Image (cartoon, rainbow, N blue to C red):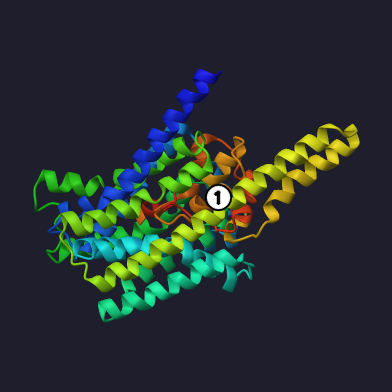
């Protein structure tokens, strides 16, 4: 059993590294698609992503959710909103990378956790701990410093961060698994995207059939680039603790930042370093607070279990219920609703509540992310996800490049 557990842990860690590694290195992919413009690339991503996930769902014969979704207009409307928001996220990210703004794009996924927390306060009236307020304040100061440094607001970063935070909020209310969610969203995107490609073709601007078989193959592979990290993330989410995934998620924006500075040679004057340093300080505060909360919650759960075993069966039942729900009350955030997707899958395996504060943020989620994506692949009920973000005080959102993020990011 111990050997199997260690093997599962290693498999999960490798899949997590693969998922966030792919999301972090994706800026290397989009320039390969030139001379196609950002809008054409975006349209191909929508079309080919649907083709890829449709084949995957056919293989596993998982279509019952589609009929249920069509019979629920409110959920279907939320899927339409999610599709619109992730379209903005994907489009801005692709344009930013191919226009020489990789560093600013990476900043969007660094500040996403802070934006998500702010939305929890403003929209859901969440109450934050003092350290979380401090992190949000430091993050706001960072945006001011970067605004001075850039000579303008970092609109690329802000657009990516806010669009992804809104996307995560909407997806939680939809309560649909990651792969299914990606299929539903790209199905909505499909006709407009295909129509644009046909229009582009009639006007002589389509590069798909004019730049050779290699270029066409790369454009078609956008679907694989979108979905494959989600599969790896799903495999990791059911095998490693939330705290581990929470730390791994920072690999994506870190890789993107390093690529922007070291590979693409983007400028980093002192004021930008100062702004990024403030963002990183805010994330250190947030992560430290989450880990402290995790330890306290873990001790409280252990004590509750010990006490419950000493009581009568009836009292034991009552204590069990209290223990199952009480841990989620620490602070509540957007993720408290229930669709943290993959987060729920991990929790269902027995991972400690509240350890996923960082994961719940879904910062990277730049590639799109759809954290919640692979909980379906694991077959674990997402209902167990309730309370993960609550205990951590940080909203759970899709992984970055999942765009599905969370399974997520560009």
User: From the image, which quarter does the C terminus lie in?
Assistant: bottom left
Picture residue at 65% right of the left edge, 43% below the top: 298
Is any atom of residue 153 visible in this view? no
Q: Residues within 10 Å of mark 1 (few under 14, many from 20)?
A: some
Helix, strand or loop at disc 1? helix
Picture residue at 18% right of the left edge, 55% below the top: 262
User: Residue under circle 1?
Assistant: 291
Q: Position of residue 117 (x, y in %)?
A: 53, 65
User: From the image, which quarter does the N terminus lie in?
Assistant: top right
Q: Position of residue 172 (x, y in %)?
A: 56, 56
In front: 164, or 38?
A: 164
Direction from residue 28 to residue 237 in the image, left or right: right
Direction from residue 382 to residue 249 in the image, left or right: left
State which quadrant residue 344 falls in. top right
Is any atom of residue 45 visible in this view? yes
Picture residue at 47% right of the left edge, 42% below the top: 244
Direction from residue 167 to residue 151 in the image, left or right: left
In front: 379, or 138?
A: 138
Q: Position of residue 37 (x, y in %)?
A: 18, 63
Relative to 234, say whether 93 is above or below: below
In front: 293, or 103?
A: 293
Picture residue at 16% right of the left edge, 47% below the top: 216
Q: Position of residue 131 (x, y in %)?
A: 56, 64
Label total for image: 1
């Amino acid at each position: 059993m111990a050997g199997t557990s260690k093997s599962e842990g290693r498999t999960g860690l490798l899949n997590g590294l693969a998922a966030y590694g792919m999301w972090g290195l994706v800026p290397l992919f989009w320039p390969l698609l030139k001379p196609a413009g950002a809008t054409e690339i975006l349209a191909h991503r929508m079309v080919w992503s649907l083709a890829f996930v449709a084949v995957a769902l056919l293989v596993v014969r998982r279509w019952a959710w589609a009929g249920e979704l069509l019979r629920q207009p409110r959920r279907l409307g939320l899927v339409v909103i999610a599709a619109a928001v992730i379209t903005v996220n994907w489009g801005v990210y692709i344009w930013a990378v191919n226009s020489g703004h990789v560093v600013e794009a990476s900043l969007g996924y660094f500040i996403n956790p802070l934006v998500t927390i702010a939305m929890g306060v403003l929209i859901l009236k969440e109450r934050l701990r003092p350290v979380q307020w401090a992190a949000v304040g430091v993050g706001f100061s960072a945006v001011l410093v970067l605004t001075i440094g850039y000579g303008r607001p970092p609109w690329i970063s802000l657009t990516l961060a806010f669009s992804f935070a809104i996307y995560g909020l909407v997806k939680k209310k939809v309560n649909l698994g990651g792969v299914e969610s990606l299929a539903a969203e790209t199905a909505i995107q499909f006709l407009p995207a295909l129509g644009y490609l046909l229009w582009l073709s009639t006007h002589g601007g389509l590069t798909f059939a004019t730049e050779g078989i290699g270029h066409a193959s790369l454009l078609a592979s956008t679907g694989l680039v979108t979905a494959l990290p989600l599969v790896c993330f799903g495999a990791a989410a059911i095998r490693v603790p939330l705290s581990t995934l929470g730390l791994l998620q920072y690999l994506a924006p870190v890789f993107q930042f390093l690529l922007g500075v070291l590979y693409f040679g983007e400028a980093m004057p002192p004021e930008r370093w100062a702004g990024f340093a403030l963002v990183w300080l805010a994330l250190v505060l947030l992560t430290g607070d989450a880990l402290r909360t995790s330890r306290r919650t873990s001790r409280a759960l252990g004590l509750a279990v010990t006490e419950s075993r000493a009581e009568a069966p009836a009292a034991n039942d009552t204590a069990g219920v209290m223990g199952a729900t009480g841990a989620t009350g620490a602070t509540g955030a957007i993720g408290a609703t229930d669709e943290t997707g993959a987060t729920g899958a991990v929790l269902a395996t027995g991972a400690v509540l509240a350890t996923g504060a960082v994961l719940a943020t879904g910062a990277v989620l730049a590639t799109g992310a759809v954290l919640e994506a692979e909980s379906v692949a694991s077959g674990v009920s997402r209902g167990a996800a309730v309370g993960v973000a609550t205990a951590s005080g940080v909203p759970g959102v899709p992984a970055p490049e999942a765009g599905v993020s969370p399974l997520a990011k560009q």
